[in-house]
Amino acid sequence: MASRELCALKMTVHDIRTIGEEIVGELSWSTVISLVKNVVGICIGIAIMIIPVVLFFVGLQQYLQSISVVIWIPLLSMYEFIVIAIILMYIVNYEDCKNKD
């Protein structure tokens, strides 16, 4: 019985290898190169979109720490961040307006 299961496993591995070789054999180098270019382009695009968001939250965290407000950022959701940022902008603008008068 064990030899029958081992034989079935060998056949499955052989089938998977054969299917993989057929797929790779059908791909031309230009297809592979364009696929790699697309993947790299997508990764760069995602990085370009994520980096400003990360920098904003790092700056927000440093600003909150500089005004002695202790908030553990991972506990907050994205919407709470936006609400806190808007409230802080109004507070800062209000304080600036009061100081000008």
Image (tube, helix red, strand yellow):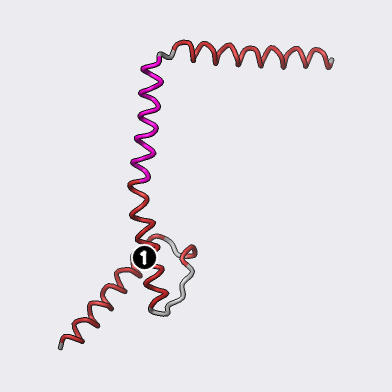
Q: Would you say the magenta stretch is mainly helix, strand or loop?
A: helix
Q: Is residue 44 magenta?
A: yes
Asked where in the image residue 7 lies, by quadrant, the reply is top right
The relative height of residue 8 versus residue 69 in the rendered view (above or below) is above
Kindly give the residue lying farthest to the bottom in the view shown: 101
Q: Quadrant of residue 39?
A: top left
Q: Residue at x 23, y 81 (%)?
A: 94
Q: Position of residue 18 (x, y in %)?
A: 58, 11
Q: Point out the stretch of residues depicted in magenta.
A: 29-47
> In this view of the protein, which residue sits in the foreground, 18 or 79?
18
Residue 22 picture location, percent across and down: 51, 11
In the visual, does 51 lie left or right of 73? left
Q: Secondary structure at mark 1?
A: helix
From this view, report whether residue 93 is shown above or below residue 23. below
- State the residue at coordinates (33%, 48%): 49
Q: Residue at x 48, y 62 (%)?
A: 74
How many numbered discs sit on the rendered protein?
Answer: 1
Q: Quick one: which residue is furthest to the left in this view?
A: 101
Which residue is under mark 1? 59
Quadrant, the C terminus: bottom left
Give the residue type at disc 1: Gly
Q: Residues within 10 Å of mark 1 (few under 14, many from 20)?
A: few
When the figure is inspected, residue 35 is found, relative to residue 70, above or below; the finding is above
- State the quadrant of the N terminus: top right
Residue in front for this viewpoint, 61 or 12: 61
At 69% from the left and 12% from the top, the residue drawn is 11
Membership of 85 in magenta stretch: no
Percent x, y of residue 8:
73, 14
Image spot of residue 12 (x, y percent): 66, 15
